[in-house]
């Protein structure tokens, strides 16, 4: 699997000179299987840049197929959809798997942002590409080509956000953004989802001091990300979903503090990477 980051910021886009190194776009990650299948995780503003990159492939000719995994439908995770160039090209096809009590409810949520008060697109049906929208059943694996996907919900303020485990040929990648754990940490089911992942991208929105004053927002500190990685025995932890007010220097400090925390709490063998736009990882 090859993983690439297109947006790593949380809550709202934060472009500008203070965020150039890590990037200011909101959440979007792509995963390519060994055989070339594409999974897109979340549709933040980074999706626009992924779409532009895909125009030089089969997606630019109307022959593209991909699975989109949607952790939840907060705006910073769906705002890129209307600016994703491949959806305007007839012949492209997307299977969208996300959180919802039913597939029709999930589709209705996505249609809501196409309301003419918010968008000139009016409806998903005005897009050139076709969509197959399906609600995920937590804990029930499904296939996306050669990739096996399993999802579990994490608490996220007043709602929940899905964490995903993607497996191929004995390798495992976990994406766990927008996780606001209680004091006890992740549930046993969620830790099972994380267990032994070769790479885990985990919400690291805040420093512990900032997170302590913003618990109702449903995000993790880097310490909570590190604790989850240690408890699950992952190979590499990737910090992600940085607060919009954090400069590149703030993220540098967050990364260094996370490294020190891992080393002091039994995670010295866990590799640590701070996600940045354009970064590629091979699993």
Image: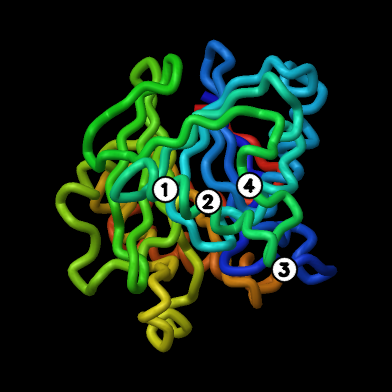
Disc 2 and disc 4: Cα gap in Å? 9 Å
**Residue lying at 36% horizontally and 80% vertically, measured from the top left:** 215
Observer-side mark, 3 or 4, equals 4
Mark 1, residue position: 106
Q: On the image, which quarter does residue 233 sit in?
A: top left
- Neighbourhood count class around disc 1 (C-alpha, 10 Å): few under 14, some 14–19, many 20 upward: many
Would residue 93 be found to the left or right of residue 168 on screen? right
Furthest-left residue in this view: 188
Q: CA distance from mark 3 to mark 2?
A: 23 Å
Mark 3 or 4, nearer chain start: 3
Judge by depth and name the residue closer to the eye, 227 or 184.
Answer: 184
Q: Secondary structure at mark 1?
A: helix
Disc ID at residue 110: 2
Q: Secondary structure at mark 4?
A: loop
Q: Residues within 10 Å of mark 4 (few under 14, many from 20)?
A: some
Between the residue at mark 1 and the residue at mark 3, the CA separation in whole angstroms equals: 27 Å
Residue behind mark 4? 123
Q: Of discs 1 and 3, which sits in the foreground?
A: 1
Residue 37 placement, left or right of 147: right
């Amino acid at each position: 699997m090859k993983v690439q980051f297109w947006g790593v910021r949380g809550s709202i886009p934060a472009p500008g000179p203070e965020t150039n190194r890590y990037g200011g776009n909101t959440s979007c990650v792509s995963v390519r299987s060994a055989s070339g299948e594409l999974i897109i995780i979340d549709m933040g503003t980074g999706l626009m840049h992924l779409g532009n990159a895909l125009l030089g492939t089969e997606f630019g000719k109307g022959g593209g197929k991909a699975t989109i995994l949607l952790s939840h439908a907060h705006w910073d995770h769906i705002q890129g959809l209307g600016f994703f160039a491949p959806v305007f090209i007839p012949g492209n096809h997307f299977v969208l798997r996300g959180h919802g009590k039913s597939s029709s409810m999930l589709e209705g949520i996505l249609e809501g942002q196409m309301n003419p008060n918010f968008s000139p697109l009016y409806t998903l049906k005005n897009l050139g590409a076709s969509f197959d929208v399906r609600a995920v059943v937590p804990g029930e694996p499904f296939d996306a080509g050669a990739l096996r996907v399993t999802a579990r919900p994490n608490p996220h303020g007043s709602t929940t956000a899905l964490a995903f485990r993607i497996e191929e040929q004995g390798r495992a990648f976990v994406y766990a953004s927008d996780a606001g754990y209680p004091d006890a940490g992740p549930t046993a089911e969620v830790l099972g989802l994380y267990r032994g992942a070769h790479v885990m991208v985990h919400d690291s929105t805040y420093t512990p001091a900032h997170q302590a004053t913003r618990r109702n927002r449903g995000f993790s500190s880097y310490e909570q990300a590190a604790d989850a990685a240690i408890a699950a025995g992952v190979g590499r932890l990737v910090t992600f979903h940085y607060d919009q007010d954090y400069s590149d220097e703030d993220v540098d400090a967050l990364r260094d503090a996370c490294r020190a925390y891992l080393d002091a709490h039994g995670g010295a063998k866990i590799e640590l990477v701070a996600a940045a736009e354009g970064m590629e990882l091979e699993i």
